[in-house]
Image (cartoon, rainbow, N blue to C red):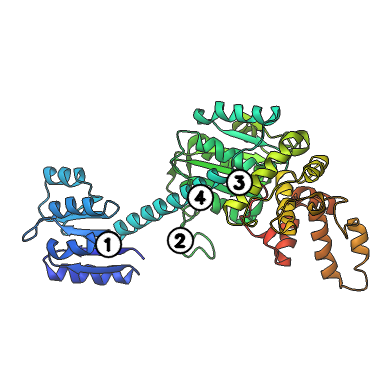
């Protein structure tokens, strides 16, 4: 909860302010002088200070100066009945957030505090996103030295400083989010947030609110105002994964937001302007979607300014072993895998190279993680690599399903069938949905009904 300190030697004003602010669910306290307020500020116990300009002893400008020195993140609002251009300029020069002229309406103070709290929340969320990006960049480098992956890195180097939209194409599991993060990290926006939205993992009815935000009461369940992903990405990059799954109704609003850098939150009549770079990705044949009328042609051309296609792992087999060894080192750094980094045996490396990896890098990671557990901290051998023909009990999906007849009821068999198809597809939900003869969204619905974490909203389908 945001902590608000009111500093004024007029007791009646402080009592009224504390009472009204508390009614709004905020934590408010009062001090009768700057000298009384300063220790709490220096201990970091205050987020927002409302301070009168004229106080006995230390005045409001001096308290503002000392506050900014002791606690730069604390916001200060100066209040005064003696307004002048000089004092206003001096207050703002010293770092005041706002300047209030007495007498003021209590609602005016509440609205100002809400703006401050909203801004502070955005700053906190952006800082968390930057930390997430830094963590990802430290462990999620683009690994490989094949000519195909070198070409991808070259394209990243060219487009990163340009601030132009990028469309990343490639199969599920090839690392499209990683490429987007690398573009962001090497751009002039690197200090800004890197916000990820998986369009396929958000229900159609909620996608617009997720993208553009909403006002309180905009729809049933909108209990408070919420900024959307566009606003959270202010000054940074918005990565929209699975853009081909965005409904046509949203695509027109998305195009306007990208072109004008402006949008309307749900329930609001006031447009919001943002400075955001757009990177989109899809594992679908997006041009076919355009021809079929399932994706707007104008939006496609706006996103496809600089396409980057990531090759599947089967087309760059020379990268398989370096990627596997990178995962082993990464897990050791996280305290996993025994006292030393598990070695990858020559037979294991050969087996990894011989497999087509339909699930790409994600499938490789999952298989290798299982192998390190089976190896018990020792060298990973071919016997530990559980892929096609690589372990016990791996008959076809049809054979394993047939064995369940008479032992499980229909809902349980359906759940198991979906699990087996997902496994056979290497976690690729688009391929699994096609195999099952259902849409991707229908697959997500079943996974959510089954209670599977794979169906959780917001969970990325590729990294």
Q: CA distance from mark 3 to mark 1?
A: 42 Å
Residue 449 screen position, x and y as percent: 72, 66
Residue 188 visible to an observer of this rendering: yes
In this rendering, the answer to whether 113 lies above or below 142 is: below
Mark 2 or 4, nearer chain start: 4
Estimate how packed mark 2 is, as few (under 14), some (14 to 19) or many (20 or more) residues with alpha carbons within 10 Å. Answer: some
Mark 2 or 1, nearer chain start: 1
Q: Are marks 4 and 3 in contact (CB under 8 Å)?
A: no
In this rendering, the answer to whether 186 lies above or below 9 is: above
State the residue position of label 1: 46
Q: CA distance from mark 4 to mark 3?
A: 28 Å
In this rendering, the answer to whether 459 lies above or below 275 is: below
Q: Which mark is residue 216?
A: 2
Q: CA distance from mark 4 to mark 1?
A: 27 Å
Residue 305 visible to an observer of this rendering: no
Q: Which mark is residue 5?
A: none
Q: CA distance from mark 2 to mark 1?
A: 27 Å
What secondary structure is marked by label 2?
loop
Estimate how packed mark 1 is, as few (under 14), some (14 to 19) or many (20 or more) residues with alpha carbons within 10 Å. Answer: many
Mark 4 or 3, nearer chain start: 4
What secondary structure is marked by label 3?
helix
Please name which of the two marks, 4 or 3, marks the residue nearer to the observer.
Answer: 4
What secondary structure is marked by label 4?
helix
Q: Are marks 2 and 4 in contact (CB under 8 Å)?
A: no
State the residue position of label 4: 132
Q: Are marks 4 and 1 in contact (CB under 8 Å)?
A: no
Residue 232 screen position, x and y as percent: 47, 48
Mark 2 or 3, nearer chain start: 2
**In which quadrant of the rendered view does residue 182 lie?**
top right
Residue for point 27% across, 59% down: 48
Which of 447/377 is in front? 377
Q: Are marks 2 and 3 in contact (CB under 8 Å)?
A: no
């Amino acid at each position: 909860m945001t902590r608000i300190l009111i500093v004024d030697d007029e007791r009646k004003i402080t009592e009224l302010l504390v009472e009204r602010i508390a009614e709004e669910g905020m934590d408010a306290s009062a001090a009768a002088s700057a000298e009384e307020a300063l220790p709490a500020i220096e201990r970091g116990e205050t987020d927002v200070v409302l301070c009168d300009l004229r106080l006995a002893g230390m005045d409001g400008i001096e308290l503002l100066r000392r506050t900014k020195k002791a606690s730069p993140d604390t916001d200060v609002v100066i209040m005064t009945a003696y307004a002048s251009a000089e004092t206003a300029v001096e207050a703002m020069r010293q770092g005041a957030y706002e300047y209030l002229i007495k007498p003021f309406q209590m609602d005016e103070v509440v609205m100002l505090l809400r703006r401050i709290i909203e801004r502070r929340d955005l700053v906190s969320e952006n800082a968390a996103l930057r930390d997430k990006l830094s963590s990802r960049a430290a462990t999620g480098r683009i690994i490989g030295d094949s000519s195909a992956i070198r070409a991808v890195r070259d394209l990243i180097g060219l487009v990163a400083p340009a601030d132009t939209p990028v469309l990343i194409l490639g199969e599920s599991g090839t690392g499209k989010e990683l490429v987007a993060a690398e573009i962001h990290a090497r751009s002039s926006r690197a200090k800004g947030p890197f916000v990820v939205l998986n369009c396929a993992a958000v229900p159609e009815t909620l996608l617009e609110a997720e993208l553009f935000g909403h006002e309180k009461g905009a729809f049933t369940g909108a209990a408070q105002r919420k900024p959307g992903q566009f606003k959270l990405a202010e000054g940074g990059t918005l990565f929209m994964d699975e853009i081909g799954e965005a409904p046509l109704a949203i695509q027109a609003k998305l195009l306007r937001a990208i072109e004008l850098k402006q949008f309307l939150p749900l329930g609001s009549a006031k447009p919001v302007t943002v400075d955001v770079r757009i990177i989109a990705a899809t594992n679908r044949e997006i041009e076919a979607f355009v021809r079929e009328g399932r994706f707007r042609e104008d939006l496609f051309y706006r996103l496809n300014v600089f396409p980057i296609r990531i090759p599947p792992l089967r087309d760059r087999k020379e990268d398989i072993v370096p990627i596997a060894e990178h995962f082993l080192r990464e897990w050791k750094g996280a305290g996993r895998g025994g006292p030393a980094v598990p070695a990858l045996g020559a037979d294991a490396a050969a087996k990894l190279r011989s497999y087509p990896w339909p699930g790409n890098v994600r499938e490789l990671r999952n298989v290798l993680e299982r192998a390190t557990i089976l190896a018990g901290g020792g060298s990973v051998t071919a016997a530990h690599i559980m892929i096609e023909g690589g372990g016990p009990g791996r008959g076809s999906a049809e054979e394993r399903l047939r064995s369940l007849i008479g032992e499980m009821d229909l809902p349980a068999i359906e759940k198991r069938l979906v699990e087996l198809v997902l496994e056979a597809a290497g976690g690729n939900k688009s391929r699994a949905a096609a195999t099952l003869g259902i849409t991707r969204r229908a697959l997500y619905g079943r996974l959510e009904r089954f209670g599977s974490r794979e169906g959780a909203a917001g969970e990325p389908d590729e990294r």
